Amino acid sequence: MTITKIINNFFSSPEVLKYYSHPHFKKPEIFLIKKFFKKKGKILDICCGGGRVMFMLSQLGFEVIGVDNNKSMIYAAKQETKKKHYSNIKFFLKDASEFIFKKNYFDYALLLDNSIEHIPSKAKRLKILQNIYFSLKKDGLLIISLTSPFELKTFFKILFFRGDEFGDCIQRINVANKQFFLFYHYFFPWERKYFEKIGFRILEIFPLNLFDTSKNHFSNPNFYKFFHNLFYCYYVLQKV
Ligand SMILES: C[S@@+](CC[C@H](N)C(=O)[O-])C[C@H]1O[C@@H](n2cnc3c(N)ncnc32)[C@H](O)[C@@H]1O
């Protein structure tokens, strides 16, 4: 099976569609949106899935535009929109690397739930970040989440997976007691530097461990902040 098929199969499965089209925020998302999206404005949600975050933002009074390349996701998102009559919400079925919107249009952008890691090509990942940069207003913010390659099991999979690029691997995952495969490209610390090359300034970094302390081995939050490159993180980037 090709990598594109693996990705498409996963995101088109009913269990996954249900999760991503059910309106909800995760705990860190509530914190970040409260802290950084202070004034109401226009939001671009790249790899928006079934719109779970967009529905919440629409209810909060933001204007939201979402892009995803999975037909079933966009269909589920549109069905949910009709059902609950959300306003100021629009979905586009398109590959994010080919989606170029108006220049300097959005106040904020989102690339959540590690979506960029399911894009199997460095050139495409960079293009997506460049497109977001183009469409954001000056000083506009992008919130992006990235998992870490430094978890032991993941690290060995990356070492032994013969993908096109170092950092690629296929993971087996369980959703609602069903087994799936999914493609990941894990970002090593040196790849996180691309943000700055494109023109973003890293405003703040929040390791996930600050929000979910139940699994923390170290009680001092500064440990996670200092070694953030080793952990799942939310990055708040600003267009300068
Ligand atoms: C992990 S889901 C996250 C969805 C959403 N960001 C959220 O947090 O609920 C990743 C999404 O990225 C989409 N995706 C993967 N590759 C894409 C591409 N090249 N262009 C647009 N969307 C893509 C998938 O279809 C899927 O809906």
Image: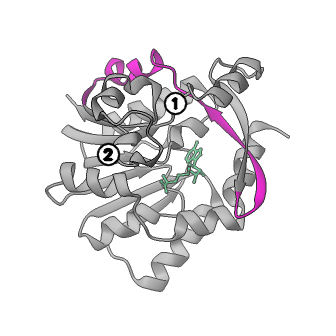
Q: Indicate if the residue with disc 2 has its beta carbon within 8 Å of ligand 1.
A: no
Magenta span covers which residues? 175-203
Would residue 123 be visible to someone looking at this image?
yes
The residues bearing labels 2 and 1 have C-alpha atoms spaced at a distance of 32 Å
Q: Which residue is mark 2?
A: 102
Q: Where, quadrant-wise, is the C terminus in this rendering?
A: top left
Query: Dot 2: within a 10 Å radius of its alpha carbon, few (fewer than 14), some, or many (20 or more) residues?
Result: few
Q: Secondary structure at mark 2?
A: loop
Query: Which residue is at the far right?
Result: 1
**Relative image position of residue 2 (x, y in whole percent):** 81, 38
The amino acid marked with disc number 2 is Lys
Left or right of residue 62, residue 121 in this image: right
Q: Which residue is mark 1?
A: 148
State yes or no: residue 195 in magenta: yes
Q: Residue 195 falls in which quadrant of the image?
A: top left
Which residue is drawn at the image coordinates 36% and 30% (left, top)?
A: 224
Q: Nearer the viewer, residue 122 or 103?
A: 122
Which residue is drawn at the image coordinates 52% and 43% (left, top)?
A: 115
**Relative image position of residue 76 (x, y in whole percent):** 58, 70
The amino acid marked with disc number 1 is Ser
Which residue is drawn at the image coordinates 72% and 38% (left, top)?
A: 171
Q: Residue 225 falls in which quadrant of the image?
A: top left
Is residue 47 positioned above or below 200 on the image?
Answer: below
- Tell me which numbered mark, 2 or 1, is placed earlier along the sequence: 2
Q: Are marks 2 and 1 in contact (CB under 8 Å)?
A: no
Query: Which residue is at the far left?
Result: 39
Query: Dot 1: within a 10 Å radius of its alpha carbon, few (fewer than 14), some, or many (20 or more) residues?
Result: some
**Relative image position of residue 57 (x, y in whole percent):** 32, 65
**Relative image position of residue 147 (x, y in whole percent):** 51, 35
Q: Indicate if the residue with disc 1 has its beta carbon within 8 Å of ligand 1.
A: no
Q: Nearer the viewer, residue 90 or 190?
A: 190
Q: Secondary structure at mark 1?
A: loop
